Amino acid sequence: MKVKSFLLVLLIAITYQVKAQQPTLLPQFTFFKLDGKSFSNKDLKQGKQNLFILFDCTCEHCQREIKSLNANYKLFQKANIYLITLDEAYIIPQFFDTYAKGLNKKPNVTVMQDKNHMFIPAFLPKMYPAMYLYSPTNKLLVYNAGDGGIKKIMKEINK
């Protein structure tokens, strides 16, 4: 009986998660840069749009989208780019060397780990990669899950 109750609660929680809309304002967060230093809302660079991308190093969709971001980097220079992953630190440089050489070293790009698993409950992504473009006042402008997000965001950034 306890297992059935647990499964019912789990199903309700999953249903709520799927039906939940993306937050319209940038949620509170704390992630960790690859040097181990914490990074939160108070550390955001002001006056620009902020692009958050949740990615997984082994995800083919993520690999394609990050590669597209790198190929079109000049169009994203107006934004701060925050790339967040749950992956271990050792694999992240390999990911960039393979799919987006040099992107992680650009001045407006910050790569971070979600060590405390905050991204998913705070931002409510539906799948990888999840992309969120926020205005300089932290209002959600574009949300995309899965393929095609980079093209969609390019149009918004360059309006």
Image (cartoon, grey):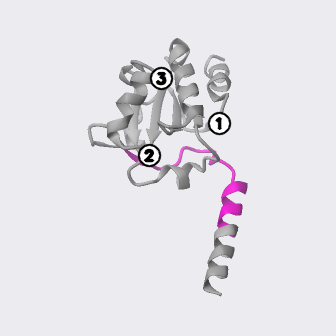
- Indicate whether 14 appears above or below 79: below
Q: Amino acid at mark 1?
A: Gly
Asked if residue 14 lies in the magenta stretch, the reply is yes
Q: Position of residue 95 (x, y in %)?
A: 42, 29
The residue wearing badge 2 is 86
Q: Is residue 111 above or below residue 29?
A: above
Which quadrant: the C terminus?
top right
* Label 2 close to label 1 by CB (< 8 Å): no
- Distance of label 3 from label 1 (alpha carbons): 17 Å
* Marks 2/1: CA–CA distance: 17 Å
**Element assignment for label 3:** helix
Side of 51 relative to 37 (left or right): right
Residue placed under numbered mark 1 in the picture: 146
Horizontal and vertical percent for residue 42? Answer: 39, 42
Badge 3 density bin: few <14, some 14–19, many ≥20, Cα 10 Å: some
Q: Residue furthest bottom?
A: 1
In-front residue for pair 65/95: 95
Q: Earlier in the sequence, mark 2 or mark 3?
A: 2
Q: Amino acid at mark 3?
A: Tyr
Judge from the rendering whether residue 127 lies leftward or rightward of residue 33; answer left or right. right
Q: Is residue 122 visible?
A: yes
Q: Which residue does the numbered mark 3 point to in the structure image?
A: 99
Q: Quadrant of residue 116?
A: bottom left
Highlighted range, magenta: 12-31
